[in-house]
Amino acid sequence: MAGNGQTVIDLDRKRMQAMASKDVATLESLIADDLIYTHSSARLDTKRSLIDNMTSGSTVYSAVEPSDVKAQDLGDTVVLTGVAQIKVTANGNPLAFGVRFTDVYAKRDGRWQMVTWQSTKLP
């Protein structure tokens, strides 16, 4: 794995932990303003709507645990693929499931930010 790959894998793990711990400051830093976040349910979020749903309590992540994460280092872009186990309460409904995901980070103004997330529920 090239130099940027492990750096971005570590940042994405930090982002997932921030989602579970409701660390909004970390999310604000690691998520790009133009984020396109496609949930496994096909619901779309922007950076604002994702964070707003978390802070309002309509979406509460209690765990996001990645595994088997691989990185494709494309220079100023890194594409991550992997699996994550997610525990979330959405509109009062507790859910626990696994997803396979594609996650894209771009280096902007000298720092890495997540620009795209796409996940599919595992059977």
Image (cartoon, helix red, strand yellow):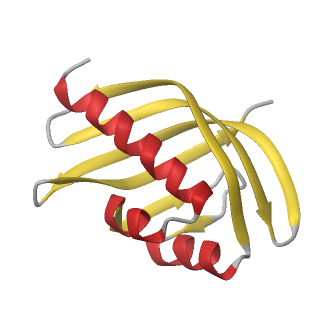
Quarter of the picture containing the C terminus is top right
In this rendering, the count of numbered labels is 0
Q: Between residues 30 and 76, which one lies in front from this camera angle?
A: 30
Q: Is 8 drawn above or below residue 40 in the view shown? A: above
Q: Quadrant of residue 61?
A: bottom right
Q: Residue at x 79, y 62 (%)?
A: 89
Measured as percent of width and height from the top left, residue 118 is found at 53, 47
Q: Is 17 drawn above or below residue 28 in the view shown? A: above
Q: Is 75 drawn above or below residue 94 in the view shown? A: above
Measured as percent of width and height from the top left, residue 22 is found at 57, 65
Q: Is residue 5 left or right of residue 65?
A: left
Q: Is residue 75 left or right of residue 69?
A: left
Does residue 38 show up? Answer: no
| Residue sitting at the far right | 93
Measured as percent of width and height from the top left, residue 41 is found at 72, 55
Q: Is residue 43 left or right of residue 108?
A: right
Q: Quadrant of residue 56?
A: bottom right
| Residue sitting at the far left | 110
Q: Is 18 drawn above or below residue 11 in the view shown? A: below
Does residue 56 show up? Answer: yes
Quarter of the picture containing the N terminus is top left
Q: Residue at x 71, y 68 (%)?
A: 59
Q: Residue at x 51, y 59 (%)?
A: 37
Q: Is residue 54 left or right of residue 105?
A: right
